[in-house]
Image (tube, grey):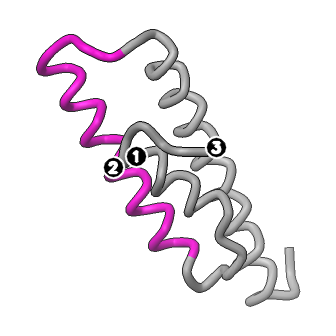
Amino acid sequence: MKADYVWEEVYAAAILETDDAKLPDRLHVAKAAIDTRLHDLQLDHGGSPEERQAISDALAGLNVLRRELERRSHGEGSSSA
């Protein structure tokens, strides 16, 4: 599958990352790329409804990944709830 936009490539890299040590950076890069694309879309009122939906879905996916990473990292460091 070929990505049409940079944000899609870095989002895929974040979603597919299995190393928790690398994941925070991947999440940050993906979020920054999506934010940049959203800014571009706001400036020229461009983008298809499909891309806008894909961006929305990607942001939701990144949030799930971020929460899961936080849950795992907090779970490892402490034995109390």
Mark closer to the chain start, 1 or 3? 1
Q: Classify 2 as above or below 19.
A: above
Distance (Cα) linking label 3 and label 2: 14 Å
**Amino acid bearing label 2:** Ala
Q: Nearer the viewer, residue 42 or 49?
A: 49
Query: Would you say the residues marked 3 and 2 are in contact, meaning their CB atoms lie under 8 Å apart?
Result: no
Give the structural element (helix, strand or loop) at label 3.
helix
Mark count: 3
Give the structural element (helix, strand or loop) at label 2.
helix
Percent across and percent down for residue 8 are 48, 45
- The residue positioned 42% from the left and 37% from the top of the image is 4
Q: Classify 2 as above or below 73.
A: above
Image-based side of 56 in relation to 5, left or right:
right
**Amino acid bearing label 3:** Gly
Mark closer to the chain start, 2 or 1? 1
Q: Is residue 11 magenta?
A: no
Give the number of the disc on residue 61.
3
Span of residues in magenta: 23-47
Task: Say which residue label 1 marks.
Answer: 7
Image quarter (top left, top right, bottom left or bottom right) of the N terminus: top right
Image-based side of 54 in relation to 10, left or right:
right
Give the number of the disc on residue 33.
2
